[in-house]
Image (cartoon, rainbow, N blue to C red):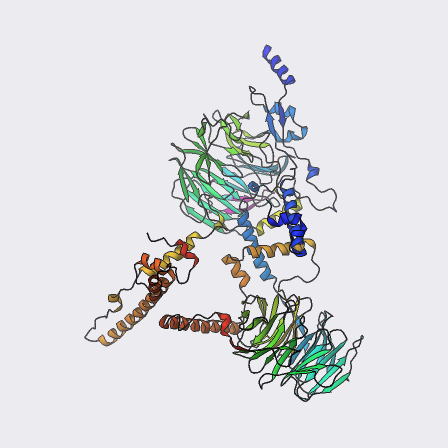
Amino acid sequence: FQTTMDVAAEDSDQMPSGFHAKAAAKAARLRREAAKLASAAALESPGGIESRPGEWAPTQSKLLRRVAVAARPGHFELSLQYGPYSVAYDTTGRLLALCGRGGHVAAFEWRQKRLMFESQVNEPCHALTWVGAGSTPQLAVAHSNWTYIYDAQGLELHCLKRLHKANKLFWLPRHWLLAACTDTGHLHWQDVSTGQTVASYCGHHGPLRVSALHPDSGCVLTGQPNGQLCIWTPLEKRPVVKILCCPAGVRAVATAPAGHAVYTLGGDSRLRVWDIRCLRPLSVSDSGADAASIRLFDAAPQLAVSQRGLLACPVRQGAALMVLPAGGAKPLLSHPSPGRLSDLAFCPWEDVLAFGHARGLGSVLVPGSGEPNPDGAVHPLSGKRQRREAEVRGLLDKLPPETIAPPAVGGGVNAVDAEGIEEALARKRAAVMALPSDEVRQFQPRRRSGKASGELNRKVGERWQRRRMELRQLLKSKKRVLAEMGDEGADAAGGRKTKKAKKVSQSGELTKPATGTFLDRLIPKAD
Amino acid sequence: CLFPVLIDQLNTHWPMKVKLLLRNPQDYLRETADDIHKLARNPAPELHPMSAETEYVRALNAAKLERMFAKPFLGCFGDQGDQLSRVCMHPRALSLCLSGCVDGRVAFWNIPRRSRVLQLDAHSGCVQGLCWHPEQDLFYSCCDTDRTLKAWRVGDDLTEFSRPVSQRHLDFAPLNLDHHVSKDLFALSGDAVYLYDSRRSDPVGQWKWGSDSVLQARFNPTEWHLLAAVTKDNALLLIDTRQREPLRRIRCEFRQNALCWNPQEPFVLATASDDYNLYSWDARRLASPACVYRGHTNAAMDVDFAPTGRELVSASYDCTVRLWESGRSQSRDVYHTKRMYRVFAARYSLDARFIVTASADFNLRLWKARASEKLGALTPRERAAVNTAEALKQKYAHHPQVRRIVQHRHLPKRLYQAQLEMKAIRGKQRRKEVNRREHRGEDKEPFVPERDRHVRGVDE
């Protein structure tokens, strides 16, 4: 938009002085550069499939025939024997880790198929997540009892005994927090950079088996068997928000890596999408006819959402996976799974989806799932030095856990402290309302008689002397507040009018407060 | 079966269009080792959640880093052997300054090296005035004990000169000296303000108001006919050299020890007062000071404006040096050391980056004007980082955590206790005022703003 200075800058004769002309020219130049940056042609464009109306979803072989050879590393299958596998990508999308219920833990760069480490921990592993920044990757794995952190070579760095029986691990990159939901109903938030436990409490909402992280705010969402969706933050030991999202129990919760959409799969096999900012349903289908939900029959409860809003879910009792487009009900593609599906994960910044199943894991190409243009050094092609710099900057910019709050609750760093203002006003009103009455002020304690009564009488007298002074101060402050609030306040409070206020009303002028403060506009008008 | 053939034909005639996201590494990697690394940018807000919180954390870190790097003390100039009374910066050379001692010695210092270049036994008593000629390599010194004004020439090779170029015997005891910014005039203050021309033996002008002596008189750098003077009877005089009588006399409550004109704003001057405050005055409206600078816990002995006209430095009897922003009554910074005793003079360097102080512990000290400034050349990235940090601190300056860090300064215990005492005294005074006003009423005890409390009257 143009300001008067912009308009004037075009005609330099209208500028008051050369100094103003220069300032206006500079401002115009900065605005032009910002507009250029904002509208700059992005480097990459997103992927996608353009298919004919009646056509079936393509298979991987069909896709592979139509894409460049360089895309082939995105499609692979690994047959492994150690139980149903969970998979996790790191935030850059370069590394893939897996852990199996049979104790198999491994991590490798999936593009070059370069193995980082592989080990057998002889304990069932339930969940995993990459922690830390991409320059020194560390893997947190939830074993049957405790959670362990491994480095890039597979060496065990930490054993987190507090994270006991964790079934889901989350990484909050901006806060450097490892969050965990456990089978015992506890929630933990552990600072990975300092090692401090930020919060660790029992939620008293039963075992938290269905959970997801909302990355934009850092809150943990859990689905309850009574159909509630609870939002948890580290500073509150109770869920901050609870919404009833399904008539039956919640079977799965998923969030997109960015944005405000929350997907819930209920016991009635309906997938619903919610807006976490206003806690209302978002319409799912394009047609808008059945906007509330889509039916996912026989869907096993694992959901994954990509950066561009594509939703992956298992179908046919976990025998195949299906990818739905953003806001659509018609599947984009599907892929059979050799074993029963146990985990799904979209690769950030790439059009790839990894899935873990009972007999190993696999990876499929999903055109249009990855965000094409990253920002900063968190993308698969960033170099080692850039990742190191980004790690240092990430540590310096580490957000305090107080910033974790659901968007629906509001607040934030730049929010106006309306509560503080209201509290101050309430205190003022309380000072006005709580009048020390004459009886209270003139009270005299009874004098006692008998042995040691002299000392007792003196002490009691002193105590009441002090109290009388306090009451006098209270009365004075009440008078002062009344004077500030003026006639309107006096009427509202029902207290005595001060001399000054009386004078003003007698002369018939508008009754304005003697010393106006900005809080006056919050005083309710006496009707 | 017929269907596979049909499907195949369909595929060949209408092939499905598939586009997969594939990145070319060349677009993300630098070409040679001499290039800088490429940085991908996407300003979309979806990729930048919690940006306000991140900015706030960066502002907090900027405030903390500024305090961590705040090391303003650069060094001592070396023991002078006796108490220093005056400091005078060279008007054209950045690295030179003069100091006058109570035993009559005048020393010539190289500021960056903090070393003494030469020393003169100028007078037999305390050097009361020191000033440079604006154009020539000449400086003047005056003493009240031997009642002389001496002019000294310093050669290019800075060798010692034991005899002055010229010497003038005065019939009064001069207390201070100032040279005109361009003309060959200088003002001596003693029992009155005397204007001398260097070519004449008798004073060209004389101004006096009352019977007490004048402590300091200074020329306005812009208005060439204007002089301001502070007297011992708590007055500030405004003098026009074209008139026979002083223009105005402001009677203050306490003695003003020093004064300084703002080099950028012709009508603004600042005075350092015995009532622990500094005052800045607008010469167009002298009824009350434009700003009252409160912070010192003992008499302010000297004040100097920065060449930018936007900052002030004050030297105080409470062994601290305070820096102020023009117009803000709370000090921006306070400098103190264990060894620095009563500070009697403080001067800004010509580039407004350094401060030289003279104190009663016989030392001159060099300080940075901006405590966390990095001395030396800044690379463009460093400069950008510094500017960003400054902008962030200003944006979040009102947030309590940021404000707390930016404002807090460590003070030694006795200074901190003195500050608390001053606060208690002021609080008591205010409380009593409020009580009197409540008891007597607004008309009998009107509210007087801070600025109007310090001037007894203005005489014309």
Q: Residue A417: give x, y in percent of width and height.
A: 45, 53
Left or right, A66 with reference to A443: right
Is residue B19 depicted above or below A517 in this figure? Answer: above
Residue B61 visible? The answer is: no
In the image, farthest residue toward the left: A450
**Which x, y percent locates residue A68?**
67, 28
Classify residue A325 by image quadrant: top right
- Where residue B124 sits: x, y (%)? 69, 87
Q: Quadrant of the C terminus of chain B?
A: bottom right
Asked whether residue B422 is drawn in magenta, I would say no
Magenta stretch holds residue A161? yes
Report the quarter where the N terminus of chain B lies: top right
Task: Please determine whether, in this image, residue A102 is positioned above or below residue A385.
Answer: above
Residue under the image location 56 percent in, 23 percent down: A57
User: Residue B205: in sight, yes or no?
Assistant: yes
The answer to which image quadrant residue A475 occupies is: bottom left
Q: Which residues are magenta?
A: A148-167
**In the visual, does A210 lie left or right of B195?**
left
In the drawing, does residue A254 fall left or right of residue A63? left
* Foreground pick, A90 / A5: A5
Quarter of the image for residue A105 reads top right
Q: Position of residue B95 (x, y in %)?
A: 72, 70
Q: Residue at x 56, y 67 (%)?
A: B331
Image: A32 above or below B109: above
What is the tally of numbered marks visible in this picture? 0
Which residue is found at the position 44% from the left and 49% from the top? A235
